[in-house]
Image: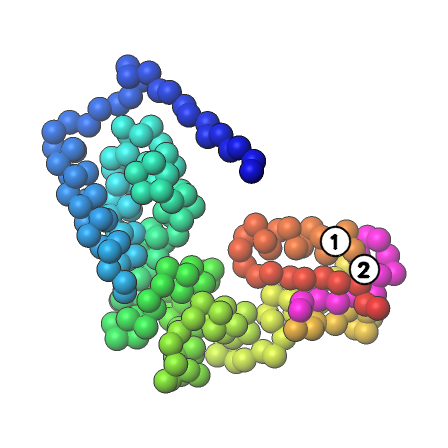
Amino acid sequence: MENKTAEVQVIPKEEIEELDTEQKDKLEELEKQISSERSKILNSFLKVGQALHIINNDKLYVEYKTFEKYCLHKWEFSRKYGYYLIDAFKVNQQLLTIVDKTKLQKLTNESHYRELNQLENKEGQAKVLEYTLEQNPDQPITAKKLKEVRLHLNVKTGEWNDEPIVAKSIKRDVLQKFDLVKGDIEITQHGLSFKQKDKKVKDYFEIIKKTLAEDGKVQVICKPKK
């Protein structure tokens, strides 16, 4: 069995900022909230996200030097996941102003809010949520269902597109950029398929895939046609 070693960073005591009594009391109260809410099954992530939001904004993590180290050493999850929880809380608060609370109660997982957070504004988020609920009235909401609606529903017009909106836009841009005909590129259930006539087209697709993956907007799988 491979031996795994962990890197331990020793921080000199004089370099550690200390909280005053009021800040320590505030931190202790918020950490109690996180511990309490994490033990619950439904919607606990929202109150955890709220507490993390305050801890991050008020820099109550300073005894751990960074928010990243605070999340990792105190709660054993990554900074990225901590921000997912914070974003879920923020999206929830925004949607409470325009969406009925009973509908928001259908979002029982942080990943649900993560999908909605890909949209630019709360109006678009609300339309995707409501459309998903309408199409699945007696079924639980999943991140997969929300993603499907997010990729196909035009939130401005309310129209459904059989082709994923982002993929459709990419197809149009690539056809124009490389002076190709429509038959050279197809949108399939797996993404975009293209005739490998030119290495530049293939390289361009690779850039698109990388950019979209980093932005978290949509996964585009590009494969040469056989």
Q: Where does label 2 land, which residue? A: 178
User: Which of disc 2 and disc 1 is earlier in sequence?
Assistant: 2
Residue nearest the observer in this picture, 220 or 161: 220
Asked if the magenta segment contains residue 102, the reply would be no
Q: Left of 74 or right of it: where is 124? A: right
Helix, strand or loop for disc 1: helix
- At horizontal 72% and vertical 61% (from top left) the residue drawn is 222
Label 1–label 2 contact, CB within 8 A = yes
In the image, residue 190 lies at what x, y percent?
66, 69
- Magenta stretch? 190-201
- At horizontal 28% and vertical 46% (from top left) the residue drawn is 52
Q: Left of 120 or right of it: where is 99? A: left
Instruction: Residue 12: tell me if it is visible.
Output: yes
Q: Where does label 1 land, which residue? A: 204
**Residue 97, relative to residue 59: is it above or below?**
below
In the image, residue 142 lies at what x, y percent?
43, 71
The quarter of the picture where residue 31 lies is: top left
